[in-house]
């Protein structure tokens, strides 16, 4: 937990409505164009040299950004058009896979249990979190649409961070479900009733949104007088915060509060629940141990799939000094795209009931297509 807290000292949150004074250049036919028009083919590091002047008023005073510039893959500008195709394929796999999980659980009455309802919540969040970033990312790779309006950036930032907080809460709820099912099996049906599961889902949404709501509010009050080049293909709070030219200690303190009350606390409780599960399982017969561990494998995989890229991205933000490095961009893309892709695959393969239902659907679809 201390490791996670240390990493998230990067988080910050700030406030103030910006107004950017942008120079224009007259072409030979008298048309006024933005100077960035001539720089679109340049790599990301060239943008940072130019953007400083775009963030200054006519008298050299600080100004606030009306937009930010997102980057693709530094050093791979020539190849990113083609790299967008596998990224788009992964996005479609993520959406279709998670929609399949939701449909299977909804259609199969035997799966209307707390564990599978939480799984549906996880799938819904995965669809939203990948959709919040992937369309803009593809626009960058295919159409070189690198600019994003200030308010749109704040909205995307809030969506990504709040959905991440919701996903962490749902993973905690799933760990609690496994704890009750294995350590107190006779009380499982009375503890995790459908109304209580619904309340947990609502609490996950409220908690994620409430904790992350101050982020865009704080950022909007910060003045920006340096570069407006972000280091990812989408807006992250710790990334935007670093571009501010004002004191961000309040942002850092609030970031510490967020990580303690969300990711840090959730990871600690998940670890504690599995210690209790392990203690209980070791006292069972071998057959019962195999069955108990089998019900936990999918969730453990989901926890690692979510937290490992999250920690890796936080480490890069904490220690990386090079703004033109490819590593933060790759980790950022993995953080948002890999969990939505792998979660339905893991649960589809490791959960017998879901696997059988999916195979039955394919079997029915195959027979229906035959003449």
Image (cartoon, rainbow, N blue to C red):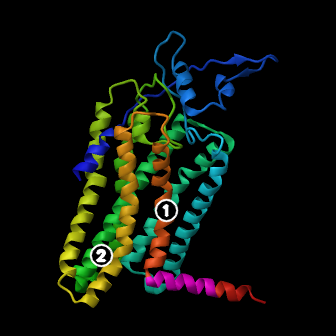
- Residue 173: tell me if it is visible: yes
Q: Is residue 303 magenta?
A: no
Disc sitting over residue 40 in the figure: none
Q: CA distance from mark 1 to mark 2?
A: 21 Å
* Residue at the image position 52 percent from the left and 43 percent from the top: 234
Q: Quadrant of the C terminus?
A: bottom right
* Residue at the image position 43 percent from the left and 81 percent from the top: 112
* Circles 1 and 2: CB atoms closer than 8 Å: no
**Are there few (<14), some (14-19), or many (20+) residues within 10 Å of tag 1?**
many
* Residue at the image position 55 percent from the left and 81 percent from the top: 358
Residue 243 percent location from the top left of the image: 43, 29
- Secondary structure category for the residue under label 2: helix
Magenta span covers which residues? 352-363
Q: Is residue 356 magenta?
A: yes
Image-based side of 92 in relation to 263, left or right: right
Judging depth in this view, the residue of 325 and 283 nearest the camera is 325
Residue 43 percent location from the top left of the image: 59, 33
């Amino acid at each position: 937990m201390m490791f996670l807290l240390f990493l998230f000292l990067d988080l910050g949150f700030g406030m103030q409505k910006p107004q950017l004074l942008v120079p224009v250049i007259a072409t030979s036919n008298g048309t006024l164009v933005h100077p960035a028009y001539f720089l679109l083919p340049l790599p990301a590091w060239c943008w940072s040299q130019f953007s400083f002047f775009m963030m200054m008023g006519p008298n050299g005073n600080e100004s606030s950004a009306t937009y930010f510039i997102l980057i693709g893959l530094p050093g791979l500008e020539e190849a990113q058009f083609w790299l967008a195709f596998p990224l788009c394929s992964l996005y479609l796999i993520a959406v279709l896979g998670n929609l399949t999980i939701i449909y299977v659980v909804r259609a199969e009455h035997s799966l209307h249990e707390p564990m599978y309802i939480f799984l549906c919540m996880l799938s819904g969040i995965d669809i939203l979190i990948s959709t919040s970033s992937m369309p803009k990312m593809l626009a960058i790779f295919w159409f070189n649409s690198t600019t994003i309006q200030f308010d749109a950036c704040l909205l995307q930032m809030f969506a990504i961070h709040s959905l991440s907080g919701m996903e962490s809460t749902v993973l905690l709820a799933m760990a609690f479900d496994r704890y009750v099912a294995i350590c107190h099996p006779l009380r499982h049906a009375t503890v995790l009733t459908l109304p209580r599961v619904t309340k947990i889902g609502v609490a996950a949404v409220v908690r994620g949104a409430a904790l992350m709501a101050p982020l865009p509010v704080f950022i909007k009050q910060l003045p920006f007088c340096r570069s407006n080049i972000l280091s990812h293909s989408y807006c992250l709070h710790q990334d935007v915060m670093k571009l501010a030219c004002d004191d961000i200690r309040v942002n850092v303190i609030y970031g510490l509060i967020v990580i303690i009350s969300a990711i840090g606390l959730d990871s600690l409780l998940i670890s504690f629940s599995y210690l209790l599960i392990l203690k209980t399982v070791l006292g069972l017969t071998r057959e019962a141990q195999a069955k108990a561990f089998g019900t936990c494998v999918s969730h453990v995989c989901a926890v690692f799939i979510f937290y490992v890229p999250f920690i890796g991205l936080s480490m890069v933000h904490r220690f990386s000094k090079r703004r033109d490095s490819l590593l933060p961009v790759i980790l950022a893309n993995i953080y948002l795209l890999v969990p939505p892709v792998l979660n339905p695959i893991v649960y589809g393969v490791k959960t017998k009931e879901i696997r059988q239902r999916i195979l039955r659907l394919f079997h029915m679809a195959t027979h229906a297509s035959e003449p």
